[in-house]
Amino acid sequence: MSVYARETIMAAGVWTGEQEQMAHAEAEDGSGPALKVLASKGIHITVPKDRIPAQEHVGVITQTEKSVLFIIPMDDYWSIGTTDTSWREPVDVPAPTAADIRYVLDHANDVLETDLSPEDVIGTWAGLRPLLQPVASDEESSSKVSREHTVMRMAPD
Ligand SMILES: Cc1cc2nc3c(=O)[nH]c(=O)nc-3n(C[C@H](O)[C@H](O)[C@H](O)COP(=O)(O)OP(=O)(O)OC[C@H]3O[C@@H](n4cnc5c(N)ncnc54)[C@H](O)[C@@H]3O)c2cc1C
């Protein structure tokens, strides 16, 4: 089946580079790929509700040196995150590391009376933020990369 459209919008997040290659797309001035996207990983952990005594509907949002820390009630659990680190592995499979989990636990423990440990963690998940790649990138700097958005028109092949 063929589909025709006057305009086609590609909003592919961390898959942007892959889609640009598939579309043979480049910047209008021919200078290379239209967008360079850096993947920044953010993880969350879950711990059982009874590990953090708190009133109903109470949570925590506070700033860390790299990101924001959320401690959010979710049914019978607390969801706690997040991190902000560069991800240079395949974008389909972001995964939390032991260091990520330790980072989240340490920052949660800074603001909690309860001392959470890795044994309290019953679930983890990870996502990738699509960030515009800086001109000079370094391995651990994704938290400093611009959070601005951009819209670019690609040159036709
Ligand atoms: C832990 C974490 C916390 C965040 N917190 C916030 C926040 O508090 N506030 C905020 O504003 N943002 C937040 N973000 C960022 C926000 O999630 C992203 O900026 C936003 O999702 C980007 O949207 P997008 O549409 O560009 O990409 P995505 O949401 O990644 O969507 C891209 C889509 O393209 C699809 N796709 C890729 N390739 C193909 C293909 N070939 N064919 C068809 N479909 C395809 C993918 O399946 C996906 O659905 C957070 C991200 C993370 C990971």
Image (spheres, rainbow, N blue to C red):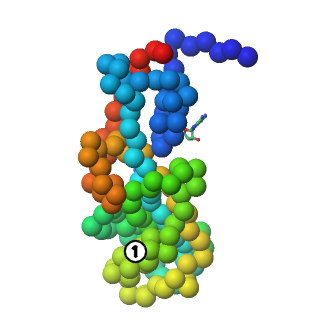
* Frontmost residue, 54 versus 142: 142
Asked whether mark 1 lies closer than 8 Å to ligand 1, one says no
Asked if residue 109 shows in the view, the reply is: yes
Residue 64 appears at what percent x and percent y? 30, 68
Which is nearer the eye, 138 or 42?
A: 138
Rendered image quadrant of residue 40: bottom left
Residue 57 left/right relative to 125: left
Please tell me which residue is depicted at 26% across the width and 46% down the height of the picture: 136
- In which quadrant of the rendered image does the N terminus lie? top right
Which three-letter amino acid code belongs to the residue tagged 1? Tyr
**Residue at 49% of width from left, 85% of height from top?**
117
From the viewer's perspective, tell me whether residue 150 is left or right of residue 119: left
Give how far across and how far down residue 119 sits, in percent: 56, 85
Question: From this viewpoint, is residue 79 visible?
Answer: no
Q: Position of residue 126 (x, y in %)?
A: 52, 60
The residue drawn where x is 44% and y is 74% is 99
Question: Residue 79 location in percent, x, y?
Answer: 51, 68
Residue annotated with mark 1:
103
